[in-house]
């Protein structure tokens, strides 16, 4: 073997510590999968607890790496920095909460299977690779690990025709979006000869770019934006969102609507801010169009929904529009506001689906807004929790949802996009209607179902903490905003 080849595959083993969370999680997946094979059906709870322990330890390992500066390892394909560590901790915490909410639902609907938890862990591993990817190849590898896991999770309820349909729809459309993203990456690689994010940034900032090179780079940029916009669910690449949200088991919808959004934003930061940041004037125009379309379509179409999962799907599209507005400003405070928004959105989305899951019973899947009728009489406490969640999503102070929108709009105005801020405010006011509709159903509509809501103690406790945090975090928004800014 030549010296060049030897140098290419050599690396300092001491740097493995910066990839320790991923290494540990991958090892845990293999061990849990092997253990689950030999477990009897009555002991399947062990798989759940082992998965939770694995995620918790991975979170601790990620947290321990905060403050270690920027480290680029594996021949420039993997980066550790505070952005990666903080995003990973956020994903782990969100995943733990999602699995707590999911346990009762999975038992009720006969979906409590070892492969479900293994697929969730694989999806988390893919997201971690996306967050730390520092080459186009690594980012794409992480995205495909995530996507393949989600395709299977969505269709895991094989006896449900709508779940299988949702899985196939997401697979086909996701494959097209991945192809477009890969095509854009290939154009960027072809024009500059490197997969490394920092080398792409150096090439894109070069003053001596020929017009033909600039044209190819811009085309590659467009395809990359399309791929990322699909994963985020931005208009006009949103058609999969409501159908997949409705067709998937509610526990999968909860996971899909929250944790992958953090990874998608991290991928956006790696590709467009760190890699193609010099082309910000080009992609910010695309983001403005995507943001306004997403906020408008998401807010208006949600008004016509009677299915709670479809309503929350269009609500998600609207929230994604606000996140894209933050990135469109082209400022560090704008980027920080977008990161703050995605974290608060995940907090609210998980809590909202947690309450939806609470309403599920054996043989009954809670999917309609009318299912919330009379909730205040059946469970005053969880009706209060849902009230807090809906008011926060509507952007009512002092809840965290208000400050997430306020910080975004503040940066939009500071960047000179006053008309965009006005449009966003108008649609935010319109969107308040469908959140208030749920509150009306809970407190003012009568229901024939007067049975009390029963759920496990851990679900009740975590959901209560989740909802209270939406209020508590809103009392100290600047502290959390500063943490979001610290990742840049």
Image: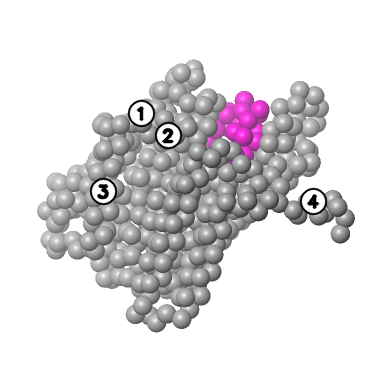
For label 2, the SS is helix
Label placed on residue 7: 4
Q: Residues within 10 Å of mark 2 (few under 14, many from 20)?
A: some
Residue 218 seen in the current view: no
Range of residues picked out in magenta: 264-291
* Residue under label 1: 478
| Residue 248 or residue 334, whichever sits in front | 334
Could you tell me how far apart the alpha carbons at marks 3 and 2 are, in whole angstroms? 21 Å
Mark earlier in primary sequence (2, 4): 4
Q: Are marks 2 and 1 in contact (CB under 8 Å)?
A: no
* Residue under label 2: 483
Mark earlier in primary sequence (2, 1): 1
Q: x, y (%) of residue 231?
A: 53, 48
* Residue under label 3: 465
Q: x, y (%) of residue 19?
A: 58, 52
Could you tell me how far apart the alpha carbons at marks 4 and 1 are, in whole angstroms? 47 Å
Mark earlier in primary sequence (3, 1): 3
Residue 74 seen in the current view: yes
For label 4, the SS is helix
Q: Residue at x 36, y 31 (%)?
A: 479
Mark earlier in primary sequence (4, 3): 4
For label 1, the SS is helix
Could you tell me how far apart the alpha carbons at marks 2 and 4 are, in whole angstroms? 39 Å
Q: x, y (%) of residue 390?
A: 27, 42
* Quadrant placement of the N terminus: bottom right
**Residue 469 shown left or right of residue 115 in the figure:** left
Q: Residue at x 51, y 66 (%)?
A: 29
**Residue 282 shown left or right of residue 440 in the figure:** right
Magenta part, dominant SS:
helix
């Amino acid at each position: 073997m030549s010296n060049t080849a030897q140098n290419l595959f050599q690396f300092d083993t001491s740097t493995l510590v910066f990839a320790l969370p991923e290494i540990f999680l991958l090892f845990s997946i293999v061990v849990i999968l092997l253990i689950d094979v030999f477990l009897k059906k009555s002991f399947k709870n062990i798989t759940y607890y082992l998965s939770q322990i694995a995620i918790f330890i991975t979170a601790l390992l990620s947290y321990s790496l905060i403050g270690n500066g920027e480290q680029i390892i594996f021949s420039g394909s993997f980066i550790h920095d505070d952005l990666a560590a903080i995003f990973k901790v956020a994903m782990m915490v969100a995943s733990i909460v999602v699995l707590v909410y999911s346990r009762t639902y999975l038992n009720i609907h006969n979906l409590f299977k070892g492969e479900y938890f293994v697929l969730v862990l694989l999806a988390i591993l893919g997201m971690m690779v996306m967050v730390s990817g520092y080459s186009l190849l690594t980012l794409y590898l992480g995205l495909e690990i995530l996507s393949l896991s989600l395709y299977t999770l969505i269709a895991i309820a094989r006896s449900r025709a709508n779940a299988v349909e949702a899985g196939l729809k997401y697979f086909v459309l996701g494959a097209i979006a991945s192809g477009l993203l890969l095509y854009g990456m290939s154009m960027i690689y072809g024009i500059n000869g490197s997969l490394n994010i920092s080398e792409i940034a150096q090439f894109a900032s070069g003053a001596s770019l020929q017009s033909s090179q600039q044209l190819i780079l811009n085309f590659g940029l467009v395809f990359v934006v399309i791929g990322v916009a699909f994963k985020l669910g931005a208009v006009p690449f949103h058609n999969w969102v409501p159908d997949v949200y409705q067709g998937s088991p509610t526990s999968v919808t909860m996971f899909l609507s929250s944790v992958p959004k953090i990874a998608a934003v991290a991928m956006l930061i790696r590709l467009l801010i760190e890699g193609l940041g010099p082309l910000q004037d080009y992609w910010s125009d695309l983001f403005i169009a995507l943001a306004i379309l997403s906020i408008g379509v998401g807010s208006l179409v949600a008004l016509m929904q009677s299915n709670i999962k479809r309503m929350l799907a269009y609500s998600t599209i609207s929230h994604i529009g606000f996140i894209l507005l933050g990135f469109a400003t082209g400022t560090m405070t704008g980027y920080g506001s977008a990161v703050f928004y995605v974290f608060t959105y995940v907090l609210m989305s998980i809590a909202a689906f947690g309450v939806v899951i609470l309403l599920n019973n054996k043989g009954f899947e809670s999917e309609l807004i009318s299912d919330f009728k009379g909730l205040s009489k059946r469970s005053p406490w969880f009706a209060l929790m849902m009230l807090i969640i809906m008011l926060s999503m509507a952007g009512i102070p002092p809840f965290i949802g208000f400050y997430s929108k306020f910080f975004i709009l503040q940066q939009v105005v500071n960047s000179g996009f006053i008309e965009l801020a006005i449009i966003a405010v108008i649609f935010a006011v319109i969107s308040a209607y469908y959140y208030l509709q749920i509150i009306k159903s809970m407190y003012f509509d009568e229901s024939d179902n007067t049975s009390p809501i029963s759920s496990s103690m851990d679900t009740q406790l975590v959901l209560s903490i989740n909802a209270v945090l939406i209020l508590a975090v809103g009392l100290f928004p600047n502290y959390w905003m500063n943490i979001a800014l610290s990742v840049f």
